């Protein structure tokens, strides 16, 4: 119903130090709000029932009795809610005191997790009051009149998620408990913390959580206490963070004077798929030498909810300063890849077909940067423009202008006469603009490039991009083939920004104008004649669909392993107001139909560097039979 998403929350209440009744009331209020928002699991800060900064008051029976009474009050007043809640409090276990997380639901205590690593350095003195989980032998305790399990290796299992718990300093240990819990099956880790503030510390904490979340391929929900804690020596900043496999989903406002509830949805289905694909994770599971975990069933009543998370319609294209960094890195990878191949083959030239379109422009820019890096003359780059039946003045002029301004060698070879002769040879009517008419032109161009490469001891540089490969939008043994494909793992939506980035950052005014016009030119193979106004008639996106939609589908299918129904749901959110449901469904069907049917082209791709998280190289990320059936995927789309 919710496509694998689990709604979680970090609750940061106001507290009064040692006033358990007041604190319980604040906790109850936030539990009620979270339940009303259909949150499935909510966690509170460490020792939230008493407050973390009680000091030697933790040794006072009055405070400890009051804490248990407050928990009993919370159990009674929230028993009507479906939400599972994780609270922090001190608990007496056989004449010792533990710093514990208590998991409750519908008036019942499901389990108690003691803190393992007790900080006892600088401003922390926890060993003065608490006992580590390592020194607790009891496996059950009596709490609020209930006999409940006590264990650090405890997993709570609901119908759609399994979660584990660690407490503050546990995360800072060399091997955090969360690592073991994840290997034993925890999809999400909840950390109840009392992490005080200091200059630069927040950045460090965020980095630590992001890395642990990514290392465990897990969701990580971190909540630290806030306003109301004692400020005798330290300050706590209301730090609530929700991560998914290294990515920040939601965060609190720091240093707020009021209570906070930070909510997001963690995609458990995505996490489980990522673990399936990551064989290193499976290898670690086999080497996990710890006591067997205690598995606690959690009663759940799954409710449908609207996602508060947003989904970028351009998952391959970051925003802001990150885009600048992404562009530099992409070019660096492409350039190093091509440089190695040129040096290894002792090639004297790089031969590239220049159409005036996006892909060939990007490949040319990569050649320019590579030759400059190697200290080679740009004249060693042979740009070949090959006008055909569909070539327009706009693309032709842009191709010539760009090559002239960049100072490369230029050859112009029309393919018209050769194609006309070829049509005569095979008995094809030149007025029939079918696949034979189109592919003959693409193969003629490839033949020219290959022969010029032989003639000049050069390499043919491929221009096709990742999106075209996913859709099979290439002529087999035509533009499908090259000697090194520098764009092979770059999606079309990113190609546009790469060219635009070079135009705005590294080009003179004339070249910049040309590049920006190329960016704004409709995408087309230009294999059929132009319209009566000399404009491009054959527009790729009219035929196979918008590339932004296909790139979104490709990212979620190949990168995340999502099924068509989930991709459709996310696309309706990401492209709301731009594409209606029927349009999305139409192109979703097209993507999967073409993706399966065109695998044979990807099974024999030229070499090319992996740039991002996805590549379709048969030697790399994607190995699929060329005759695999798409029926299962297409049926699911038909049933939407």
Image (cartoon, rainbow, N blue to C red):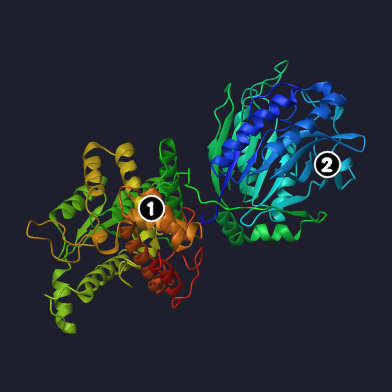
Give me the C-alpha separation between circle 1 and circle 2: 49 Å
Disc 1 marks which residue?
572
In this rendering, which labeled residue sits more in front, label 1 or label 2? Answer: 2
**Residue at point 83% right, 54% down?**
291
Front residue of this view, candidates 129 and 147: 147
Tell whether 549 sits left or right of 262: left
Residue that extends furthest to the left in the rendered view of this protein? 532
Tell whether 517 sits left or right of 632: left
Residue 527: image quadrant is: bottom left
**Residue at point 73% right, 51% down?**
155
Task: Tell me if residue 407 can be seen.
Answer: no
Placement of 15 over or under 116, stated as above or below: above
Answer with mark 1 or mark 2, whichever residue precedes in sequence: 2
Q: Secondary structure at mark 2?
A: loop
Disc 2 marks which residue?
145
Front residue of this view, candidates 14 and 540: 14
Q: Secondary structure at mark 1?
A: helix
Give yes or no for contact between labels 1 and 2 (Cβ–Cβ under 8 Å).
no
Placement of 171 over or under 427, stated as above or below: above
Front residue of this view, candidates 181 and 469: 181
């Amino acid at each position: 119903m919710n496509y694998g998403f689990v709604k979680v929350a970090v609750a940061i209440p106001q507290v009064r130090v040692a006033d358990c009744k007041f604190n319980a009331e604040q906790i109850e209020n936030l539990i009620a709000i979270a339940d009303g928002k259909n949150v499935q699991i909510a966690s509170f800060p460490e020792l939230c029932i008493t407050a973390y900064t009680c000091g030697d008051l933790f040794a006072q029976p009055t405070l400890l009795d009051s804490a248990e009474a407050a928990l009993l009050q919370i159990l009674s007043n929230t028993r009507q809610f479906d939400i599972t809640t994780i609270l922090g409090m001190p608990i007496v276990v056989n004449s010792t005191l533990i710093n514990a997380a208590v998991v409750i639901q519908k008036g019942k205590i499901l389990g108690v997790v003691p803190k393992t690593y007790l900080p006892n350095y600088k401003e922390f003195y926890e060993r003065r009051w608490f006992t580590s989980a390592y020194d607790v032998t009891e496996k059950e305790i009596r709490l609020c009149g209930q006999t409940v399990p006590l264990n650090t290796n405890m997993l709570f299992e609901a119908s759609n998620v399994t979660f584990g718990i660690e407490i503050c300093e546990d995360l800072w240990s060399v091997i955090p408990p969360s690592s073991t819990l994840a290997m034993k099956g925890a999809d999400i880790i909840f950390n109840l913390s009392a992490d005080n503030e200091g200059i630069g510390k927040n950045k460090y904490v965020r980095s630590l959580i992001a890395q642990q979340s990514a290392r465990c391929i897990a969701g990580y929900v971190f909540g630290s206490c806030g306003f109301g804690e004692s400020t005798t020596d330290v300050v706590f900043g209301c730090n609530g963070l929700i991560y998914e496999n290294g990515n920040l989903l939601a965060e609190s406002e720091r240093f707020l004077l009021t209570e906070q509830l930070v909510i997001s949805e963690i995609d458990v289905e995505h996490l489980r798929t990522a673990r399936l694909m990551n064989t290193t994770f499976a290898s670690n599971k086999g080497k996990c030498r710890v006591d067997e975990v205690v598995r606690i069933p959690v009663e759940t009543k799954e409710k449908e909810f609207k996602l508060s998370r947003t989904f970028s319609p351009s998952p391959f294209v970051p925003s802001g300063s990150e885009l600048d960094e992404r562009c530099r890195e992409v070019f660096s990878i492409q350039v190093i890849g091509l440089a190695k191949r040129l040096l290894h083959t002792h090639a004297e030239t790089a031969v590239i077909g220049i159409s005036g379109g996006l892909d060939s422009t990007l490949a040319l820019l990569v050649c320019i940067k590579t030759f400059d890096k190697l200290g080679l003359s740009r004249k060693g780059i042979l740009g070949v423009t090959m006008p055909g039946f569909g070539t327009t003045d706009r693309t032709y002029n842009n191709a010539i202008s760009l090559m002239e301004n960049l100072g490369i060698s230029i050859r112009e070879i029309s393919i018209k006469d050769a194609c006309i002769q070829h049509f005569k040879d095979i008995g094809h009517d030149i007025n029939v603009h079918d696949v034979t008419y189109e592919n003959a032109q693409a193969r003629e161009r490839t033949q020219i490039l290959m022969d010029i490469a032989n003639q000049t001891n050069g390499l043919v540089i491929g221009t096709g991009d990742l999106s075209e490969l996913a859709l099979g939008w290439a002529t087999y043994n035509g533009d499908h083939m090259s000697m090194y494909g520098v764009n092979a793992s770059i999606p079309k939506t990113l190609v546009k920004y790469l060219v635009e980035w070079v135009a705005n950052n590294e080009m003179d005014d004339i070249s910049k104008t040309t590049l920006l016009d190329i960016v704004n030119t409709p995408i087309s193979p230009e294999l059929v004649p132009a319209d009566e106004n000399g404009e491009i008639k054959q527009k790729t996106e009219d035929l196979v669909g918008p590339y932004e939609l296909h790139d979104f589908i490709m990212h979620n299918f190949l990168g995340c392993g999502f099924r068509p129904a989930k991709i459709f749901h996310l696309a309706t959110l990401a492209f709301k107001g731009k594409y209606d449901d029927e349009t999305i469904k139409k192109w979703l069907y097209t993507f999967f139909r073409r993706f399966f049917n065109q695998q044979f082209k990807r099974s024999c791709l030229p070499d090319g560097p992996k740039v991002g998280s996805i590549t379709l190289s048969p030697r790399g990320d994607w190995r699929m039979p060329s005759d695999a059936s798409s029926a299962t995927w297409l049926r699911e789309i038909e049933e939407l």
